Amino acid sequence: MSIIERVGKKERQYVEEVLSMNFRSSAGYKMTKRLEEAFVEKFDSKYAIAFCNGTATLHVALEAAGVGMGDEVIVPPLTMSSTTFGVLHANATPVFADVDPDTFVISADSIEKCITHRTKAIIVVSLYGLAPDFDRINAIAKKHNLVVIEDDAQCFLGKYKGKTVGTLGDMASFSFQSSKHITSGEGGMLITTNLEYAERIRKYSCLGYAGVSTNKGKISKTDIQEPDYSRHVSLGWNYRMSDVCSAVALGQLEHIEELVEMRIKSAKLFAEAIRNSKILIGQKEPEGYLNSYWAYTAKLVDDSIGWKRFRDKYLELGGDGIYAAWKLTYQEPFFKNMTFLRREELLNKDVNYSDGICPVAEYLQPRLLQFKTNYFDFEIAKRKADVLAETIKYFE
């Protein structure tokens, strides 16, 4: 079938189930628990903890790993700045590793060059749906005793050498924001096989409550009816996912294969359109990898054309808007001006954030064209790919 529903009957059914409970405190968390259990099964993990969004997940993952003031966390600059926000939220210092010129994901060689005695963790991003080289990154992490956190906001059901992305690091973060493969408008999930991390994640995301655990996300009514009950055993944040959002995410998870396959099929159309192009080169998918294509991304290698000129011609011929890659995080105004809400006082002063620290990412960023893949009508995707081929022909 060429047309699929993004939001189907299951999502609506589960939301109605939540609404029928009238938001009674005693009825809360039931849908979230179902979502967490389903996520564990789908991603072959041991523990899954739901969050209000996919930035809070990264913050708590770092807190669970014991990252804090004085510690450094290696991150890629070419991605949504939320990855780095998570580091700053944990009062740690981000250090930017460069990316691979062909796959656009964080480079293992660059990671190794960034390691100091202060390095505590690496956050690797599976950019546009493509995993980085986990074998090399995990070997580096093991050598230096570093925690590896996967930021898989853009990668659901991607593969790395036969393994599902999300199962390759110490913890893995997913986002359910509206543009992602599956969505509940907002939301996120952290998964891990490590019991100690899972216990910390639950407590830190639930106000440091004593009565929560890996599989229990809510304190009981019996507990809070005791006048001498001590609720909080540590500092924590209120990052819990609502049951309404969980209901939608659960319905989405139940047809995730269809939603991911739709994007892959759309991406293949765009890949075919640029196959013989001299001006566009698509994101390389190494052998043994499976890109889940949150977006189909190509670099414009003919600078005489210009990004905006190519985009404008694509629009003129009937294409959709082309998304630009995010400005590199360290080139964003909040970084240039150190607007970190006084966390700038906590940064390690010898870390360099000047232009030129990630030359490959700086070359790529203004040349990347991100084509949407979430076409729920496959015939529309075909037409847009044809327009891309026509646009390339115009410039060649």
Image (cartoon, rainbow, N blue to C red):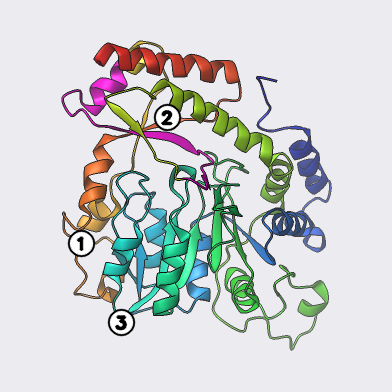
The spot of residue 122 in percent (x, y) is 41, 67
Image height of 96 relative to 323, above or below: below
Q: Which mark is residue 353?
A: 1
User: What is the CA distance from the residue labelled 2 to the residue labelled 1?
Assistant: 30 Å
Q: Nearer the viewer, residue 1 or 311?
A: 1
Question: Which badge, 2 or 1, comes first in the chain's sequence?
Answer: 1
Q: Which mark is residue 117?
A: 3
Tag in front: 2 or 1: 2
Let me know if residue 303 is in the magenta part.
yes
> What quarter of the picture does the N terminus occupy?
top right
Residue drawn at x 28%, y 11% is 394
Three-letter amino acid code of the residue under disc 2: Phe
Element at badge 1? loop
* Magenta residues, start to end: 287-313
Image height of 257 relative to 304, above or below: below
Question: Which badge, 2 or 3, comes first in the chain's sequence?
Answer: 3
Element at badge 2? strand
Instruction: Identify the residue position indicated by label 2 in the image.
Output: 371
Graded by Cα atoms within 10 Å as few (under 14), some (14 to 19) or many (20 or more), the crowding at tag 2 reads: many
